[in-house]
Image (cartoon, rainbow, N blue to C red):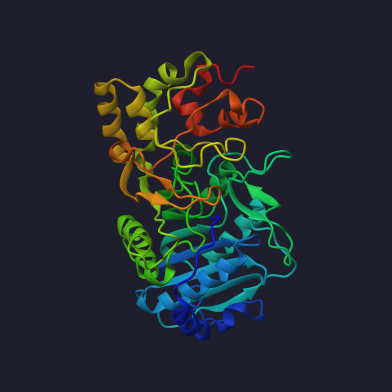
Amino acid sequence: MHLRPTHTLLPLLLFAAMLLAGCHSHCDPQPQQTAAGTPGDTLARTVIVYVEAENSLSDFATADSLEIAAGLGAMQPSARVVAVIDDAHGTRLCAGTAGTPLQTVRTYTGNPTLTDSLTMLTILRDIVTTYPADNYGLVLWSHASGWVPARQARLPRRSFGIDSGRRSLADNSGTEMDITTLAQVLAQVAHFDYILFDACFMQSVEVAYELRHVADYIIASPAEIPGNGAPYHLLMPLLAAVPADAAAITDTYADYYETGAGVYNGGGTELSVVATSQMELLAEATRRHVAGLMGYRSTPDCSQVQMFAPYGWRTTFTECYDAASLMHANLPEADYAAWREVLDRAVVHARLSDKWVTGYAPWPLTLTDAANTAGIAMFVPSELYASTGWLEHYGQLAWSEAVGFASTGWLQQ
């Protein structure tokens, strides 16, 4: 998340503030027996919301926690939400159900770094142990930029999350987490029915492939999302439902902005749902074309390809080219049709707005190839990345190996 829209939920937030009073207080560090059902009880669903907001998004974390509180009443009684929130106010664990308001059940001493792999693993394992369920859903909330490696000395990049480590400074310097590390951590916690990335640039073939063993569905955007993020007061019953309806979650999120309820200078959202069970078949289908597209260290023609990142920001972001638009522009018609059939089994739902707001240009970005855009990004190598280290990092991704990227010559110096 990067943007700062005007919030239109003031009456709702004022009401929800009364429900959430305990979620910003300091209390007994041990879980309360009254919160989210008796800890230890196995419910049908535990929704985990992992909020890393010790950065420029701290104020948005407060607003979203109020929305979560307001949405609890519409959840099924067999579900709970557990949110770990790290922001300018501290680090705390909040829990609630339809029958119990969202309240702090644990405060953390010191200033834990939520983008540290051991810290994330410990917190998430504690949650699934204390609040077990037959089904888990996960919301990952923060800044993000997909597969691109975490911050390097000269390049301010982040894969998922950013923890400044400074409560009083809402800046975006600090510790980040590579997507490969994220996948390794989540694999040791639980299997998730879905992961909703309430964060920018996380819907890509590289990310979905890396997470194919830890979640059934990835709900995310290949572009930037509004700073307000998801409308949790509307999403909570959907996030808590069993079975999960990823398409309904996506549509509700998209409708909130497209109908004007979540006004952000007229901008919408670019959202899609990926069925991870299909990612290996997609990699196999893509492998057939990688050498032709990128072999001999070449870059395919992208002049007509849909991009989700602002043009000219290549030293900060990749262009985030849409995978379907890329293949349509560069493959023979029959080859594209066969490949697209496989892609459509992987990208099972998409809601793509005509335009969306970016924090890196004074005007909205637009959907220029709507007929051939699927809503999932794929990296296109370029000599512009030769000095960044990104190509070498890309070669270490599971998707890169699966599609035979090493055969293209881009990893040779």
In-front residue for pair 75/371? 371
Query: Considering only vertical position in the picture, is 136 above or below 27?
Result: above
Q: Position of residue 150 (x, y in %)?
A: 64, 43
Residue at 54% across, 57% down = 3
In-front residue for pair 129/232? 232
Query: Considering only vertical position in the picture, is 320 above or below 28?
Result: above
In the image, is 394 to the left or to the right of 173? left
Residue at 63% across, 71% down = 92
Picture quadrant where residue 396 is located: top right
Residue at 67% across, 52% down = 116
Q: Position of residue 325 (x, y in %)?
A: 36, 33
Picture quadrant where residue 252 is located: bottom left
Residue lying farthest to the front in this orientation: 362
In-front residue for pair 317/221? 317
In the image, is 202 to the left or to the right of 44? right
Residue lying farthest to the top in this orientation: 296
Q: Position of residue 130 (x, y in %)?
A: 54, 69
**Does residue 31 show up?**
no
In-front residue for pair 38/382? 382
In the image, is 166 to the left or to the right of 349? right
Query: Considering only vertical position in the picture, is 140 above or below 406?
Result: below
**Does residue 184 show up?**
yes
* The C terminus, quarter of image: top right
Q: Position of residue 352 (x, y in %)?
A: 34, 49
Total label count? 0
* The N terminus, quarter of image: bottom right
